[in-house]
Image (cartoon, rainbow, N blue to C red):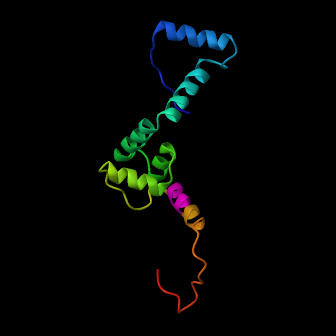
């Protein structure tokens, strides 16, 4: 888990401290995690912008960008194209290969038998 150091107004610190003392949160870290999580849940455009920026700077893979943006990989590809971001091709690492393999296993086909020589090519 990442660690962030920052500063914020004293009044906000007091409110967080009071919420912890009232049992609303287990600690200041819990409160701040909840605030950030709720922010990104409520602000889809900002969540997508963050995922696009990280992908564009090659900090994350397409799969990571899709997960952070809360969309599937195909939608994320469309979003990246809409933002003028060039897609990277190829597998980044073993985790990316595993993700791609699992995604391929989950694909559904129309039920035609691939051994059927008369079946039209797709």
Q: In the picture provided, is 109 more to the left or to the right than 77?
A: right
Span highlighted in magenta in the image? 94-100
How many labels sit on residues?
0
Q: Is residue 66 left or right of residue 81?
A: right
Location of residue 43 with respect to 106 vertically, above or below: above
Can you name the residue that lies furthest to the bottom here? 118
- Relative horizontal placement of residue 77, taking residue 105 as reference (left or right): left
The percent position of residue 44, horizontal first and vertical second, equals 46, 38
Q: Is residue 6 above or below residue 17?
A: below
The reply to whether the magenta stretch includes residue 97 is yes
Q: Position of residue 24 (x, y in %)?
A: 67, 17
The residue shown at (36%, 57%) is 88
At horizontal 39% and vertical 42% (from top left) the residue drawn is: 54
Main secondary structure found in the magenta portion? helix
Horizontal and vertical percent for residue 92?
44, 56
In the image shown, does 59 or 104 lie closer to the viewer?
104
Which of the 4 quarters of the picture holds residue 98?
Answer: bottom right
Q: Is residue 55 left or right of residue 120?
A: left
Identify the residue at image location x=61%, y=78%: 111
Is residue 27 rendered magenta in the image?
Answer: no
Q: Nearer the viewer, residue 67 or 95?
A: 67
Taking the view exactly as shown, the residue that stands out farthest to the right is: 23
In the figure, residue 33 lies in which quadrant? top right
Quadrant, the N terminus: top right
């Amino acid at each position: 888990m990442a660690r962030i150091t920052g500063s914020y107004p004293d009044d906000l610190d007091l409110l967080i401290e009071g919420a912890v003392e009232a049992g609303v949160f287990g600690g200041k870290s819990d409160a701040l995690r909840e605030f950030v999580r709720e922010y990104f849940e409520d602000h889809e455009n900002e969540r997508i912008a963050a995922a696009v920026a990280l992908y564009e700077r090659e900090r994350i893979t397409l799969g990571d960008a899709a997960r952070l943006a809360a969309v599937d990989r195909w939608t994320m590809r469309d979003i990246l194209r809409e933002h003028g971001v060039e897609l990277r091709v190829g597998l980044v690492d073993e985790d990316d290969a595993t993700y791609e393999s699992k995604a391929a296993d989950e694909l559904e086909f129309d039920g035609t038998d691939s051994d059927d020589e008369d079946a039209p090519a797709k």
